[in-house]
Structures are given as structure tokens and as C-alpha cells.
Amino acid sequence: MTSSSLDLAALEGIEAEFMYRYETDTPKATREQLGIKTTRIGGGVALSVRNDPTKFWSKALGFGFEGPVTDELIAELIAFYRSNQATHAVVQIAPDVLPADWDKIVADHGLRPGSGINKLVARVDELQFGSSDLRIDEAGPEHAEEWATVALTAFGMPWEGLGDMMMAAVSRGELRTFAAWDEDRMVAVGALLVQGPFASLNTGATLPEYRGRGAQSALIAARAKAAAAAGSEWMVSETGETGSSLNNMRRAGMRSLYVRRNWLWAA
């Protein structure tokens, strides 16, 4: 399996879309509190969260498919972040669409290389389903606060501001949310976005004291079944270059397609 054998634009685009929806569907008061500004540029999305204490949510991705990655595009992205008085951002571009003069563009705009992100993919019908002694089910609007609390706690992110944004995710029509319970206590979460033949596994997180009990493997299985029922053929996800999340996905049969570098910008 190679990137040339798949629709690379769809693989990057579905990730850009679920990130875009997290931030644009956030309640207005929370958007103002966090200083959220979003836009679509050059076929991708640019997301700025000026008051984000985690420095995670300000990123630009999904570029190089509706037009080339150019010096002008990067300049437009940086101008967008400056217009929101942002102090930082992460630019994420698939390696296959980086231009020949990328090193010069990086130097001219003061970008720095950061960590890498694995893009993983598998056919839905080839995934190997894991199990857990925890109860796995879809989480509805009545679980919104608990789902958001578990996600933020497991990711080590604060509740203030971000809690309302994460709660809104549970109520979205297309972004489906799942969870694992130990009796009546929610202990792990995950989300799924389906776009035609592609489905995105995202927001997988488990409380520290419940790691090692198969929660994420079982949540991958539940979301894969939901994706198959919706008619998707491919499962897509992203995670770091190492770690338990990568191991869980590989055990499920997902394969690394490429590593995408994080390019860091600071005002």
C-alpha cells in the first residue's frame, strides 16, 4: 500500500474537516473566550485559537491538492494567524505535495521542524477487531459533559474553555462519539467522521488508570463496524511516531502510509 494508490486529498481532507468542525461548531461565547478564528485557504483549512493554553488547536492542514503549496500560500497562512494576534501555529503538509523549494520557503518564513505524525490507513473489511472487559457503546448528547471530561483529562488538557468545545462534539450530526464504561463510569472515548468511502478514527483517549485494558482496541472495533455500516471502505487515522496509540492501530491492522512533519511557526 502506497500513498499513490489512495486518494491522498481525501486522507488529508477528512482530518482537516473534523478539526474544522470541532472549532467552527463551538458555541459563540466559547469561540470569543478562546479567540477562535477559522478559514478555508487554498483547498485546506487554517484554524487559530489565540487563547489556547495547550497550543494544540492552532493548525493549518489539507493543502496541496486544489493547488500547489507555494511561498504565497504560506505567506497567506501566516498573515491569517497574525490577523488573529496568534502567537503560534502548526503547519501540516503531506510529504508527497511538498514543493521542490520547500527548504527555502521554510527558511524565508521562519518555520521550524517539529515532531512527526503518522498517517495510518486500512481497508475497513481487513481490520482485526479487539475486545475489552469494558462496555463499549455510542455516546449520545446525554453523555456530552462526561465524554468531554474524559477526553480532556486523558489528553492532559484543561476544562476551561475547551470543555464547551468538546461537549459540542457529542451533539454533532456527522461526528459520532463512542465511549468505554466500567459499570457506570466512562473511562475512554473515541470519535468517528464518515465521508463517503473514507472514515476517520479520531479523539481516542483513555484515563490513565484504565490503560492496558483494551479500551482503545475495542473502540476501534466499534467505530469500524459503524463505518462499515455507513458504507465506508477505508479507515484513516493519525498519531505520533511512537506510543501506545500507534501500537493499538497497528494491532488492528492499520499501516503507516507516511510520516507528516509538524512545521512550527511563532510570532
Image (cartoon, rainbow, N blue to C red):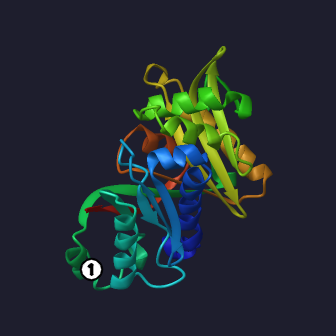
Q: Which residue is mark 1?
A: 105
**Local secondary structure at mark 1:** helix
- Residue drawn at the location 68% of the way across and 39% of the way down: 222
Q: Vertical placement of 231 versus 64: above or below?
A: above
Q: Is residue 54 left or right of residue 149?
A: left
Q: Is residue 237 left or right of residue 82?
A: right
Compare residues 90 and 229 and report the one nearer the observer. 90
Q: For the C terminus, which image quadrant?
A: bottom left
Against 69, is 155 above or below? above
Residue 169 position within the rendered picture, expressed as x and y whole percent measured from the top left? 63, 43
Q: Where 78 falls versus 115 (above or below)?
A: below
Which residue is at a point 38% across and 47% down the rendered structure image? 51
Above or below, 214 relative to 262 = above
Picture coordinates of residue 186, whole percent (x, y): 60, 22
Q: Label 1: few (<14), some or many (≥20) within 10 Å?
A: some
Q: Return the residue nearer the eye: 198 or 48.
A: 48
Rendering coords of residue 149 (x, y %): 53, 28
Q: What's the residue type where badge 1 is placed?
A: Ile
Q: Residue at x 54, y 76 (%)?
A: 43
Q: What percent of the width, then of the height, locates residue 31?
A: 53, 49
Residue 220 seen: no
* Residue 147 visible in the shown view: yes
Q: Residue at x 58, y 33 (%)?
A: 189
Along the viewing direction, whichever of 266 and 262 lies nearer the viewer:
266
